[in-house]
Amino acid sequence: MSKRCQVTGKGPMSGNNVSHANNRTRRRFLPNLQTKRLWIPSEKRFVKVKLSTSALKTLDKIGYDSLRKLDLK
């Protein structure tokens, strides 16, 4: 399973772990993804999506009918 938001397209970023001695090793910053079942009132069905939490807040504002444009099944 890819660590990518289905709405915003957010994915992992890379960066450094920095120790007290200032040694740097590479690391990954993963997005905060949640798997949700959302009720789409216009289609009268549930849709299972993998969203970042910021996308979930955005969908609360713009409505869940906008998921239809993304062709999620």
Image (tube, helix red, strand yellow):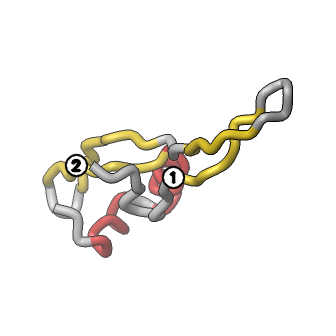
**Is residue 47 shown above or below 26?**
below
Q: Residue furthest bottom?
A: 69
Q: Is residue 59 left or right of residue 69?
A: right
**Figure check: 23 above or below 57:** above
Q: The residue tagged with tag 2: helix, strand or loop?
A: strand
CA distance separating discs 1 and 2: 21 Å
Where does residue 51 sit, x and y in percent of width and height? 40, 50
* Three-letter code, disc 1: Pro
Q: Residue furthest top?
A: 20
Res 73 quadrant in image: bottom left
Question: How many other residues sit within 10 Å of disc 1, few (<14), some (14-19) or many (≥20)?
Answer: few
Identity of the residue drawn at 45% across and 56% down: 59
Residue found at x 18% / y 49%: 46
Question: Badge 2: few (under 14), some or many (20 or more) residues near its Cα, within 10 Å?
Answer: few
Where does label 2 land, which residue?
48
Q: Amino acid at mark 2?
A: Lys
Tell me where residue 7 appears, x and y as whole percent.
Answer: 41, 62
Q: Position of residue 13 (x, y in %)?
A: 58, 54
Task: Find residue 68 and report its horizontal and vertical position in percent.
Answer: 27, 70
Q: Residue furthest right?
A: 21
Looking at this view, is 24 or 40 the one in front?
24
Label 1: which residue? 12
Judged by depth in the image, the label closer to the viewer, 1 or 2, is 1
Q: Nearer the viewer, residue 2 or 68?
A: 2
Q: Residue at x 43, y 43 (%)?
A: 33
Contact between labelled residues 2 and 1, with CB atoms less than 8 Å apart: no
Could you say whether the residue bearing mark 1 is in a helix, strand or loop?
Answer: loop
Q: Tell how many labels.
A: 2
Residue at (25% x, 43% y) in the render: 37
Q: Earlier in the sequence, mark 1 or mark 2?
A: 1
The quadrant where residue 23 appears = top right
